[in-house]
Amino acid sequence: MFIIATPTLILAVIVAIIIGAGVGYVMRKRTAEAQIGSAEEQAKRIVADAEEKGETRKKEALLEAKEEIQRQRQELDRDTKERRNELSRQERRVVQKEENLDRKLDQVEKKEEALSRKESRLDKSQAALNEMHEKQQAELERISGLTSDEARTMLMDDLEEELKHEKAMKIKDYEQQTKDEADKKAREILSVAIQRCAADHVAETTVSVVPLPNDEMKGRIIGREGRNIRTLETLTGVELIIDDTPEAVTLSGFDPVRREVARIALEKLIQDGRIHPARIEEMVEKARREVDQRIKEAGEQATFDTGVHGLHPEIIKLLGRLRYRTSYGQNVLNHSIEVSHLAGVMASELGCDVMLAKRAGLIHDIGKAIDHEVEGTHAAIGAEFARKHRESKDVVNAIAAHHGDVEYGTVEAVLVAAADAVSAARPGARRESLESYLKRLTRLEEIAKSFDGVEECYAIQAGREIRVMVKPDKVDDAEAVALAHNIVKKIESELEYPGQIKATVIRETRAVDYAK
């Protein structure tokens, strides 16, 4: 069924739509206005609540601030009160101290017044005594007819005449008795010291033997055209003797320190297996450091064995060097330790200063470690060295006087000299020929070192050759020939020696650079 739309119907529909829309608009407006009014009321309530809470918070903050101010005011009042109390106490103490000082000053003044009165009375008494003494002396002089000086002289003359003979007899008896007792006591002390000191010494030699793993090592030690053996002999100043002795190399040199350096370096090279000039230089340097350490340890051990402490490190170092020095075949370090023990024993028997005797005995030969470097006797050199390193004057005197060069200053100095003589005089202790031989070799090197341009020199071949290394920038080839001739002439004029001595001057120039 179809409905036919008429204009009236359409108009009615449009009017209905318009009316519906207006009614809807009015209803929505009223709803919105109601919601706006509700929101405004809610906002007013929120603002009122906020204002109320703000007022509450403000009152609480004011209350807390007032409480904090009150608390700080109370603390300030308490601190102020405590400070006032402390100031009051200090003021009372100051007043009390002032009162005590016043009382003490009054007492001191009273004592001074009392002392003044006593001194015045003593002066009067002394004057009265002096006057009485003068009167008595004048009366005695009047009665005797002699002055006091004449009476004193007469009395002394009479007493001297009476005592002169008796004094002479007593002195003679005492001298004889003292001499007998001194001889007996000296024999007892020396016998006790020798008995209590048992020392073993082995005669030092001038050669060292280094064992080899096989005979092929000899060729490696010699090197191509002998360069290895020349380098080792040049650096150490020791002669290497490579002969038919199976699996052994002999090191010959009169200086035990150089010989020990060469021995250690050669053993390290044999153990390492790499033998060439650069490696030899490295091993010789390591051996020198090792020997220096051994020297230090030997000096420290000597001080420990003898119980002597507080020595200067330089003295301990020189003491260790004595391990490699000999005197007539006797090891100087062992000799020094023995002298220290002997001097200590004798000082103990005599009731003298034991530590002073042992200290002086231990370092009495310290000059032998440097006597080849400084002019003078080893006693004078050692005494000067000890003085420079703050040893006491008694120790210095004992060192200087142990050979009788200067006067003995203490009993301990005499004991050190006696101990030195006992240690050196016992059978087998020394050999005269070895000492003369070493002195000749030392003098041979000193002659070579006296020329300008000489860097190092070594006496080898048992003193039959002197090898001299010169500085290449100061000595040219022509001057090296003249230097060898001058050394030979000086040796002939100043040294006594058997046979002949060969002088070899070595000049070496090295050019070294580094690739970077």
Image: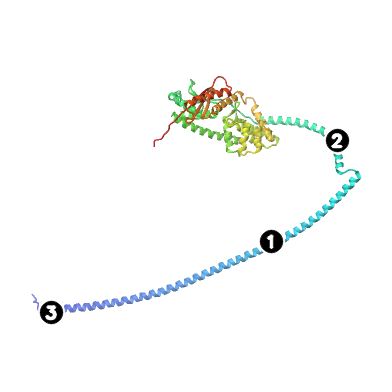
Tell me if label 3 and label 2 are in contact, CB under 8 Å. no
The alpha-carbon separation of the residues under discs 3 and 1 comes to 131 Å
Identify whether 82 is placed above or below 435. Answer: below
Q: Quadrant of residue 154?
A: top right
Q: Which residue is label 3 attached to?
A: 11
Identify whether 31 is placed above or below 145. Answer: below
Q: Nearer the viewer, residue 385 or 141?
A: 141
Tell me if label 3 and label 1 are in contact, CB under 8 Å. no
**Quadrant (top left, top right, bottom left, bottom right) of the N terminus:** bottom left
| Disc 1 residue crowd, few under 14, some 14–19, many 20+, Cα 10 Å | few
- Between disc 1 and disc 2, the foreground one is 2
Q: Nearer the viewer, residue 44 or 261?
A: 261
Q: Nearer the viewer, residue 272 or 128?
A: 128
Q: Which residue is label 1 attached to?
A: 101
Q: Amino acid at mark 3?
A: Leu
Q: Is residue 154 left or right of residue 184?
A: right
The alpha-carbon separation of the residues under discs 1 and 2 comes to 68 Å
The alpha-carbon separation of the residues under discs 3 and 2 comes to 189 Å
Q: Which residue is label 2 attached to?
A: 161
Q: Amino acid at mark 2?
A: Glu
Instruction: Provide residue 277's location: percent of width, then percent of height.
Output: 45, 29
In primary-sequence order, the first of circles 3 and 2 is: 3
Q: Secondary structure at mark 2?
A: helix
Q: Amino acid at mark 1?
A: Leu
Q: Is residue 312 visible?
A: yes
Which numbered circle lies on residue 137? Answer: none
| Disc 3 residue crowd, few under 14, some 14–19, many 20+, Cα 10 Å | few
- Between disc 3 and disc 1, the foreground one is 1
- Between disc 3 and disc 2, the foreground one is 2
Q: Secondary structure at mark 3?
A: helix
Task: Look at 54% across and 20% down and name the residue there.
Answer: 500
Q: Is residue 473 left or right of residue 394?
A: left
